[in-house]
Structures are given as structure tokens and as C-alpha cells.
Amino acid sequence: MEQGEIVVSSGRAYKVEVISVPTRTASARVKDGRIVIRVPQMLRGSAADEMLEDLKRRMVRSLEKHPERFEYRKFSIMQGQGMTALGRHFVIDACEAAGRYSTACIDGGVVRVRLAAGLGQEERGRALTKLAVRCISRSLLPELAQRVERINIAHFNAGIGGTRIRNNSTRWGSYSARSRRITINFRLLLAPEEILDYVIIHELAHARVSNHSRRFWKLVGSVLPDYRDRRRWLRINGDRLGQSQS
């Protein structure tokens, strides 16, 4: 398979991007309309080619079987929107400010976003979402970090370098072997707590097993016997998280 190859699945064309990474694990995912395949740098020649072809075949099968899973709907927050995150209810109050800079703060349960003057409609939408996410994330990060630590102590006792929240477009969570940091997608704060816990446990398990081998899923299952149900819920409903709530 060559860099830049075009793969057609379910009537859509996907450009294949191959990235060499300094890790032992390989992965394939859809990102911004591309199939991104990561291959360990240690692999060379036919071994690397075979892994690339295998990952590509699996990705194409997944795209053909469940195309809806890979349709990313842009996440945005709107004026007047209400949302419940980690059990706390927030309402978005946005208006145009007189200054050159956009700001946001939380006043009780109200997220007050003041948008810089002169922004176009698209720019206003991006700024509103970015600032509201950042503001709510800062408010809830200590509670989320405590939750991660409680689960870690109870089940893994792994060395964790910290927890952070990101408004990612493709990943629900990640674990960095280098920084030992857990990253959680902002939208998971809007999910039922048992779904959030599934992703936390999934990422903490990666502190013990770096890949998605049988050993990894056995470890996840030892903590959450119903992890398949929670993963299925996320696949079906995850794209709806963050839609306007009354």
C-alpha cells in the first residue's frame, strides 16, 4: 500500500495516510475523512507491508459494516444551550463585548461568554464553543481527576502523571506512555457516569497493557464485566452527546 492511496467505501473516498511512530503498537482510525494508519518504526520491509495491508482491510471492513460510526458531526455549543456535565447543570449566556478579545467565566451555573466585536457568524460559533468548553473543563477538572484517581487506586494502582480534558474530534480518551497522562474527551462529561467510567477504565488499563490484545480486554473485563454494553452504548449514542439539552 502506498502513501496517499485512495480507498472507496460505502460510496465515500478516503485518503490513506501512513505515519511511522516510535511505539510498539499499530493502529488505524478515520480522521477528518482520512484513514490514518500508524505503524511502529521498528518494522521494516515485508513485515511493515503486511501490517499495513491488514490494518487497511480491517478499517475498510469496519467502514462498510458500520459507516455511521465514522461520520463525525461537528461539536458546537450554542447561545442559551443547557447541558449537564458530571451532575452539574450549566447554561450558556453569550453576547458581544466591546473589546478586541473574547472571554468566558462561570457565574454559578451560568457560563458567561463575551465575544469580541466584529466576529463573523462562523468565527462566533467557534469562539463560543472553544471558550465554553475551556471554562467548563477548568471547573470540572479537579472532580474528574479525583474520579480517575479513585478508580486507579481501586483497580490498577498505576503511576498516573495527571488528567486533562480535550475537545477531541475522534478519540474518547487516550493514555500517553511518555507522560503517563490520561486524556478524556470533553463530551464524555455529558455522558452517563457509567459510560465515562468505562473510558477511564479503558485508558487506565493501557497503563498496564499498551495494545488492544486479548490480555487487555481481559483486564478491562475483570473490572467491568459489562464493558461491551457500555462500549456499544458509546458507539450508538456518542455522536449525540452535546446536542442542545432543554
Image (spheres, rainbow, N blue to C red):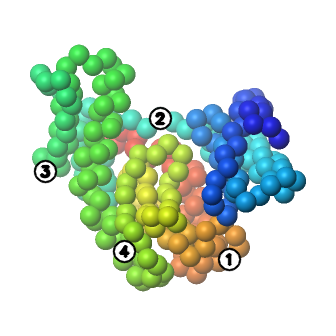
Q: Quadrant of residue 82?
A: top left
Task: Measure the C-alpha gap from mark 1 to mark 4.
Answer: 23 Å
Q: Which mark is residue 149?
A: 4
Residue under label 1: 215
Nearest the viewer among 92 and 170 is 170
Judge the density around disc 4: few (<14), some (14-19), many (≥20) Cα neighbours within 10 Å. many
| On screen, residue 22 above or below 131 | below
The amino acid type found where label 4 is placed reads Glu
Residue at screen point 45% across, 82% down: 157
Judge the density around disc 2: few (<14), some (14-19), many (≥20) Cα neighbours within 10 Å. few
Task: Measure the C-alpha gap from mark 4 to mark 2.
Answer: 31 Å
Residue at screen point 50% across, 43% down: 169
The amino acid type found where label 2 is placed reads Lys
Task: Measure the C-alpha gap from mark 2 to mark 1.
Answer: 34 Å
Q: Are marks 4 and 3 in contact (CB under 8 Å)?
A: no
Task: Measure the C-alpha gap from mark 1 to mark 3.
Answer: 45 Å
Task: Measure the C-alpha gap from mark 2 to mark 3.
Answer: 28 Å
Task: Measure the C-alpha gap from mark 4 to mark 3.
Answer: 26 Å
Is residue 177 visible to us here? yes
Please tell me which of labels 4 and 2 falls first in the chain.
Answer: 2
Residue under label 3: 108
Q: Secondary structure at mark 3?
A: loop
Q: Which mark is residue 74?
A: 2
Q: Quadrant of residue 206?
A: bottom right
Please tell me which of labels 4 and 3 falls first in the chain.
Answer: 3
The amino acid type found where label 3 is placed reads Gly
Mark 2 or mark 1: which is in front? Answer: 1
